[in-house]
Amino acid sequence: MKKMMTLIACLTLSAFVINAVPTLTTAAEEEGPKLVCPVANKPVNMEQAVEYKGAKVYFCCGGCVKKFKEDPAAFAVKANHQLVASGQFKQVACPLSGGKLNPETKITLSDVGVCFCCNNCKGKVEGETDATAQLGLVFSDAAFEKGFKKAKKEKSRD
């Protein structure tokens, strides 16, 4: 009888632990960047992805994947923004001039911190009253080429 009670206790504890792990994982995932689909502006499904500029862009559904593949240029600004928001690319220079970054010029565009070389470049972006136009100045393909590079993966120390 004692062995039976021990077995039941172990099974109950195992069931509790198994059910608790997904809750912990979900909470950890929610702490990461809030990525949105570049086509539909909805939360992404990490299983819906397309290779883009040597990285992955995530979408909310297969329909958006199809639209993106048909015309990636139409969604380039938002896709480039997502590459930075997801940490796959990092800023290395001013997106307007290609000049050295000045940390004192940092602003936030759609939850992504961006620096410029000077207050003139910063002023050009801040002078735009439309958020979409601001994103276009910083994350267009031309600006992205000047200011952002693929982030290097850290080597494992195993």
Image (cartoon, grey):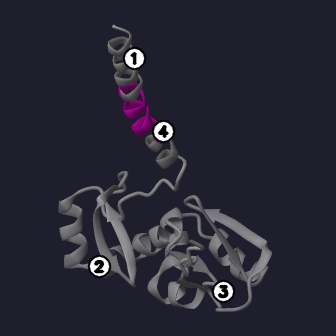
Where residue 36 appears, as percent x and y from the top left, is 40, 57
Pointers 3 and 4 in contact (CB under 8 A)? no
Q: Secondary structure at mark 3?
A: loop
Q: CA distance from mark 2 to mark 1?
A: 59 Å
Mark 3 or mark 1: whose residue is earlier in sequence: 1
In the rendered image, which residue does mark 3 sit on?
93
Query: Is 87 or 40 nearer to us in this picture?
Result: 87
Q: Secondary structure at mark 1?
A: helix
Judge depth for marks 1 and 4 and give the one in front.
1
Judge depth for marks 2 and 4 and give the one in front.
4
Judge depth for marks 3 and 1 and give the one in front.
1
In the rendered structure, which segment of residues is drawn in magenta? 15-24
In the rendered image, which residue does mark 2 sit on?
72
Query: Is 49 or 36 nearer to us in this picture?
Result: 49
**Picture residue at 40% right of the left edge, 78% below the top:** 55
Q: Amino acid at mark 4?
A: Leu
**Picture residue at 46% right of the left edge, 72% below the top:** 83
Q: Is residue 111 left or right of residue 61?
A: right
